[in-house]
Image (spheres, grey):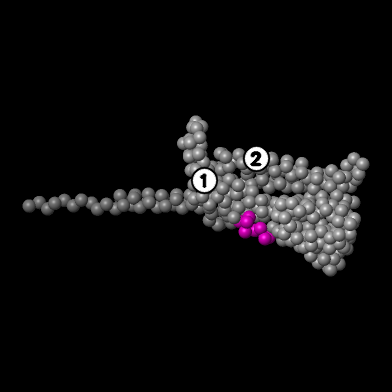
C-alpha cells in the first residue's frame, strides 16, 4: 500500500460504506438489487449526502468570492503602483502587499476552488472503489466496506446496457461495447456542459463590474474553459458509476448556485439588479448596493432640503429705532 492509498483509505471506507448502506436501503424498500438504476440512485443519494455536508464549505466559498470581488479595485491600484517594476524586490513587495490584503479580508485567489478541493478525496476514493469492482467480483472479494455480494451485485448491474464499472477506453478496440460508448459520451457531455454552464452563469450574473477586470476575472475565465476540458478528457477513463457521481454533483451545484444568485446575489452584480427589479414590481424596497445608493441619495436630498429651508427662514433684519 503506497502513501496515496494510505491517505485515501478512510475516504474509501466511508464512501463504500455509505454507498452500500444506500443500496441496502433501496433494496429494502423494494428496488431490484441487481438493477443499474438501484446503484445509480444509491450514487445520487451519496452525492446528496456529501453536498449537504459541504454546505458550510459552500457558504464559506461564497463569502470568500465576494470578498475577492470587493478587493479588485485595491488589487488594480496595487498593480498600477508596481507597473513597470520587474525587479525581484518590487515583485516580492507586491506579493506581500497582496497577501496582506487577502488576509485582511479573509479571502484568497483559490477560494472558488474550495468545494472542489474538499470533494476530490471522495471522488478519488469512489473512483478506486468502482474501478476495482470487476477484479474483486472475479476473485469473489469485497472492496473496502462493500461486501463480496454487494460487489457482485454492482458488477452485474447495467444502466442502458452498460455496466457501472465499465469505462469508455476499456470498451474500445477488441472489447468494443457500443452501449458503454454511448452512455459514456452522453454522461461526459452532461458533466462538462453543466460545469461550463455553472461557471458561465456565475460570471455573467453574479460578478460585480469591478470584478470583471483584473486577475480575478482572468482566473474565472480560465476555470470556464479549463475545468470542463480537463474533466471531458479525463472522463473517457472514468467508470460509468463515477460519471454518474460527477454529473449528479454538477447538477446539484447548478441548482444550488441558481438559488443563491436569484435570492442572495453579489452586491453590484447583474443578478442583484434583476432581484431589485422583481422587488420593485412587488412594491418592495431595493437591497444591496442599490439600497445603499438609494439611502445615500435620500440623505443628500434631505440635507439639501434642510439647507434650502434654513435659507428661506432667515430672520429679517430689524431697523434700529431713531433717537
Mark 2: few, some, or many residues within 10 Å (few <14, many ≥20)? few
Q: Label for residue 110?
A: none
The percent coordinates of residue 187 (x first, y second) are 80, 48
- Residue at 73 percent of width and 42 percent of height: 230
Q: CA distance from mark 2 to mark 1?
A: 22 Å
Residue in the image at 81% along x and 67% along y: 25
Q: Could you say which is closer to the camera, residue 253 or residue 312?
A: 253
Relative image position of residue 42 (x, y in whole percent):
80, 60
Q: Earlier in the sequence, mark 2 or mark 1?
A: 1
Residue 55 part of the magenta segment: yes
Is residue 284 visible from the viewing direction of this image? yes
Residue at screen point 80% across, 45% down? 237
- Answer left or right for 57 relative to 240: left
- Mark 2, secondary structure of its residue: helix
Task: List the single residue furthest toward the front.
Answer: 1
* Identity of the residue drawn at 52% across and 45% down: 99
Report how many numbered discs are placed on residues in the image.
2
Residue 128 at x, y percent in the picture: 78, 53
The image position of residue 32, as x and y in percent, is 88, 63
Whether residue 203 sits left or right of residue 183 in the image: it is left
Residue range highlighted in magenta: 52-59
User: Image quarter for residue 17?
Assistant: bottom right
Residue 23 is left or right of residue 226, and the answer is right
Asked if the residue under mark 1 is in contact with the one under mark 2, i.e. CB atoms within 8 Å, the reply is: no
Q: Which residue is mark 1?
A: 99
The secondary structure making up most of the magenta span is: helix
- Residue 222 shows which numbered tag? 2
As drawn, the residue found furthest toward the left would be 323
Amino acid at each position: 500500500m503506497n502513501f496515496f492509498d494510505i491517505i485515501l483509505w478512510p475516504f474509501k471506507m466511508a464512501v463504500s460504506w455509505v454507498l452500500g448502506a444506500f443500496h441496502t436501503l433501496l433494496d429494502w424498500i423494494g428496488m431490484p438489487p441487481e438493477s443499474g438504476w438501484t446503484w445509480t440512485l444509491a450514487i445520487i443519494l451519496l452525492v446528496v449526502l456529501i453536498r449537504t455536508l459541504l454546505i458550510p464549505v459552500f457558504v464559506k466559498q461564497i463569502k470568500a468570492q465576494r470578498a475577492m470581488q470587493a478587493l479588485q479595485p485595491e488589487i488594480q491600484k496595487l498593480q498600477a503602483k508596481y507597473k513597470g517594476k520587474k525587479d525581484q524586490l518590487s515583485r516580492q513587495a507586491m506579493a506581500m502587499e497582496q497577501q496582506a490584503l487577502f488576509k485582511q479580508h479573509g479571502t484568497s485567489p483559490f477560494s472558488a476552488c474550495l468545494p472542489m478541493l474538499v470533494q476530490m478525496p471522495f471522488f478519488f476514493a469512489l473512483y478506486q472503489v468502482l474501478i476495482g469492482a470487476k477484479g474483486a467480483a472475479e476473485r469473489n472479494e469485497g472492496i473496502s466496506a462493500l461486501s463480496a455480494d454487494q460487489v457482485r451485485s454492482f458488477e452485474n448491474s447495467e444502466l442502458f446496457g452498460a455496466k457501472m464499472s465499465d469505462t469508455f477506453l476499456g470498451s474500445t478496440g477488441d472489447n468494443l461495447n457500443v452501449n458503454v460508448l454511448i452512455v459514456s459520451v452522453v454522461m461526459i457531455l452532461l458533466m462538462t456542459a453543466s460545469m461550463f454552464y455553472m461557471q458561465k452563469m456565475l460570471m455573467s450574473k453574479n460578478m460585480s463590474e469591478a470584478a470583471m477586470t483584473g486577475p480575478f476575472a482572468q482566473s474565472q475565465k480560465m476555470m470556464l474553459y479549463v475545468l470542463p476540458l480537463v474533466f471531458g478528457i479525463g472522463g473517457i477513463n472514468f467508470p460509468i458509476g463515477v460519471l454518474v457521481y460527477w454529473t449528479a454533483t454538477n447538477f446539484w451545484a447548478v441548482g444550488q448556485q441558481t438559488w443563491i444568485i436569484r435570492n442572495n446575489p453579489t452586491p453590484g452584480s447583474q443578478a442583484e439588479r434583476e432581484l431589485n427589479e422583481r422587488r420593485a414590481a412587488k412594491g418592495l424596497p431595493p437591497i444591496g448596493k442599490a439600497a445603499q445608493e438609494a439611502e445615500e441619495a435620500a440623505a443628500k436630498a434631505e440635507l439639501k432640503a434642510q439647507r434650502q429651508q434654513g435659507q428661506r427662514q432667515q430672520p429679517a433684519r430689524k431697523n434700529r429705532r431713531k433717537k
